[in-house]
Amino acid sequence: GAVVSQHPSWVICKSGTSVKIECRSLDFQATTMFWYRQFPKQSLMLMATSNEGSKATYEQGVEKDKFLINHASLTLSTLTVTSAHPEDSSFYICSAATLGTLGAGELFFGEGSRLTVL
Amino acid sequence: GDSVTQMEGPVTLSEEAFLTINCTYTATGYPSLFWYVQYPGEGLQLLLKATKADDKGSNKGFEATYRKETTSFHLEKGSVQVSDSAVYFCALSDLGTLTFGKGTMLLVSP
């Protein structure tokens, strides 16, 4: 099956620093990638949708200058949390889809990255 | 907007017990419905899906039937195993965007 890998899986940083999380599709070309945020005992909250080569579309309430998303190639998308603060601590999950699977609503998920901001 | 409501966990069962995890949805269109599973330390993976009313999705002994009249997609398994312990997410897709429920943790003891 299609494999999506996130890196790092766990990161701790100081308040005010920036952190980059990578999401790679290992064996397929992902035309669309999604970034989610998951709070404890809560559902996955869609943050943004990115299509290869174009700007990401952010959901309402998500600060695009805070959460920078880049989808430079068909196998890589990055999420950069800029000037991180403790309230940004969360579990970030990416997912990817091809043109064929997107229409069917079927996504392939990364393992998630847990960010802790001190 | 679209929403998914699923029963809160954790659901604690003994091995070989019958499992039901309830899921209901609200959608303006005609969504596809999914169950995703997240095993400890892993990413979400698709368990089963149904794309239209009365469809039954099934995989690994789990099944769920798309009930349009009750807007439900309950997950069932006749005999759970310890290896089924995970978090289960019900989701719907309308126009390509997935909306998830909050997830239900299942704990199966030997």
Image (cartoon, rainbow, N blue to C red):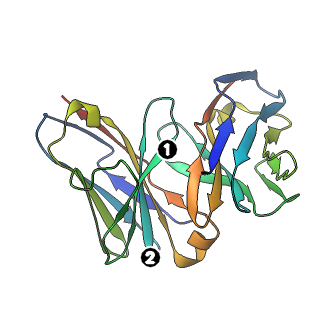
Residue B39, compared with residue A103, is above or below; it is above
Q: Is residue B110 visible?
A: no
Query: Which residue is at a point 32% across and 76% down the rendered structure image?
Result: A54
Q: Which residue is mark 1?
A: A44
The chain carrying label 1 is A
Quadrant for the C terminus of chain B in the image: top right
Which of the 4 image quarters holds residue B94?
bottom right
Q: Which mark is residue A29?
A: 2
Is there one chain holding both mark 2 and mark 1?
yes
Residue B13, how many percent across, how many down? 74, 22
Q: Is residue A14 left or right of residue B87?
A: left
Residue B86, compared with residue A106, is above or below; it is above
Q: Earlier along the polypeptide chain: callout 2 or callout 1?
A: 2
- Helix, strand or loop at mark 2: loop
Front in this rendered view, residue A86 or B68: B68
Q: Is residue B11 left or right of residue A13?
A: right
Q: Which mark is residue B18?
A: none
